[in-house]
Amino acid sequence: MAAEEDAEALAAARPLLTDLYQVTMALGYWRAGRARDHADFELSFRRCPFGGAFSLFAGLRDCVRFLRAFHLRDTDVQFLASKLPPDTDPAFFEHLRGLDCSRVTLRALPEGSLAFPGVPLLQVSGPLLVVQLLETPLLCLVGYASLVATNAARLRLIAGPEKRLLELGLRRAQGPDGGLTASTYSYLGGFDGSSNVLAGQLRGVPVAGTLAHSFITSFSGSEVPPEPMLAPAVSEGPAVNLPAHVKVWLERVCAHLGLGKQEPHPGERAAFVAYALAFPQAFQGLLDSYSVRRFQMPWLERISITVSNNVDEEELARLVQEGSEVDGIGIGTSVVTCPQQPSLGCVYKLVCVGGQPRMKLTEDPEKQTLPGKKAAFRLLDADGSPLLDLLQLAEEPSPQPGQELRVWPRGAQEPRTVRPAQVELLLGLWVHRGQLCQPLPPLAESRAFAQRSLGHLRAAHRRLQSPEQYQVALSEQLQALVGSLSPRSSP
């Protein structure tokens, strides 16, 4: 295993990244002789984040990595034994030592998919005890990744396709794992790169960086570069004394603007000159406290301007609406901490055990689960835009393009009829009995897929303020099953 793969494995979730009640339930299942009962769980969320009408699914690659590496070490089992009652049967701990995911199957949306409330992001099937133990780690791996990806996608929609967005939030992130996750999935959501070098090494995220105030303030203006000459960009031509050249051009600019002899602080000038000498072919001056405006000079048209300074959705919208000539925006705190909503609120619910559907009954309709093992489809219009997502029982025949369907929108009192031009199967098979069924796409490919998917979403669903809610519907058979298990159906 390569060094970066070793580091990636250390950064991944481990089996004991879980709640103790998962372990106590595991003991209960084992003691009741139900550890190997076949069970189906679904991971989903109840509301789209940030007041929007869509989410992006992220974290699949982390979930697959976790499942394939799942194994309790002797030290893990010994620790659990120290936290359970001393009279716990030692045979239970022997059972834990033999656990892995060799009988676990995972279906999921593709990484970067549009996702909507109630539609499973993951379907996890296997022995009851094992798939119960997977609950907390999978929720941890999916919830924050999807939240950050969605947050990044919203910022990309505001910025438009041309502005360069850089994630600079590592120093503000919730710990090193949060920082790595945020850098990875803000890129998936539409950012162009990150300042996080580890995300570049481990995840292939493009990395970028400029300079900070400390570099500027370290110069007084009296410094003399040991080698002030700048070689020409092409082979012909003389070298240029950059400090002297900058001084001449600053005088011309100030004269052009009617500023006379006014010029920047000599320390600032010296700092930018020193940086340009270090990066003659890749100079980028970061401005975060200046009023930026390109002057009417042809040579300034070639300068790329990047800004940062507590940029959030509102500030980003202002920059774009004012027609700012800024080329790149660095965003830190507001992308990695998701201040508008700190959690996606994903849930992991049992829907079938031993082949029998299970349903959580509650007075809160939003928290009521949908029973049975299910398939999910996205019904599309002729132009490729999504009409609605359809949930149905796994044994039902798949809907076909051009077929008229009678479906029950969630929360509606009456069915509706829809005739899709195209049909997409949403939940693909990624892991079957512990074996990877298809290669995970590169992160850059998932990023491109996410942007294409957002591009097909109707503007009414894509807008960030007061959007039209996207519709999720049930097949008639699934609706009938829900009705039969509801208390209202009892005589």
Image (cartoon, helix red, strand yellow):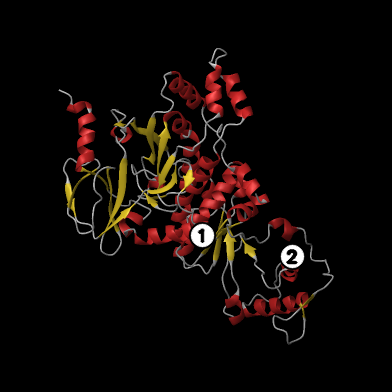
- Residue at 44% x, 26% y is 35
Task: Please state the horizontal and vertical placement of residue 212, each as a whole percent of the image.
Answer: 68, 57
Which part of the image, by quadrant, shows the C terminus? top left
Residue 341 horizontal side relative to residue 265, left or right = left
Q: Residue furthest top?
A: 87
The answer for how far apart the CA atoms under marks 1 and 2 are is 35 Å
- Residue at 66% x, 76% y is 254
Q: Nearer the viewer, residue 231 or 79?
A: 79
User: Where is mark 2, residue-wise?
Assistant: 271
Q: Where 182 falls versus 373 (above or below)? A: below
Task: Please state the horizontal and vertical placement of residue 205, each as a whole percent of the image.
Answer: 57, 57
User: Where is mark 1, residue-wise?
Assistant: 444
Residue type marked 2: Ala
Q: CB under 8 Å between callouts 1 and 2?
A: no
Q: Where 350 falls versus 441 (above or below)? A: above
Mark carried by residue 348? none
Examine the rendering and report whether any part of residue 469 can be seen. no
- Residue at 17% x, 54% y is 404
Q: Look at the numbered disc 2 and give the secondary structure of its residue.
A: helix
> Mark 2: few, some, or many residues within 10 Å (few <14, many ≥20)?
many
- Residue at 62% x, 63% y is 287
Among the 4 quarters of the image, the one containing residue 421: bottom left
Residue 7 horizontal side relative to residue 368, left or right = right
Q: Look at the numbered disc 1 and give the secondary structure of its residue.
A: helix
Residue type marked 1: Ala
Q: How many callouts does the rendering have? A: 2
Examine the rendering and report whether any part of residue 222 can be seen. yes
Task: Please state the horizontal and vertical placement of residue 431, each as a whole percent of the image.
Answer: 45, 45
Q: Nearer the viewer, residue 95 or 304?
A: 95
Task: Please state the horizontal and vertical placement of residue 463, each as a whole percent of the image.
Answer: 36, 56
Residue 97 horizontal side relative to residue 261, left or right = left
Q: Where 410 falls versus 310 (above or below)? A: above
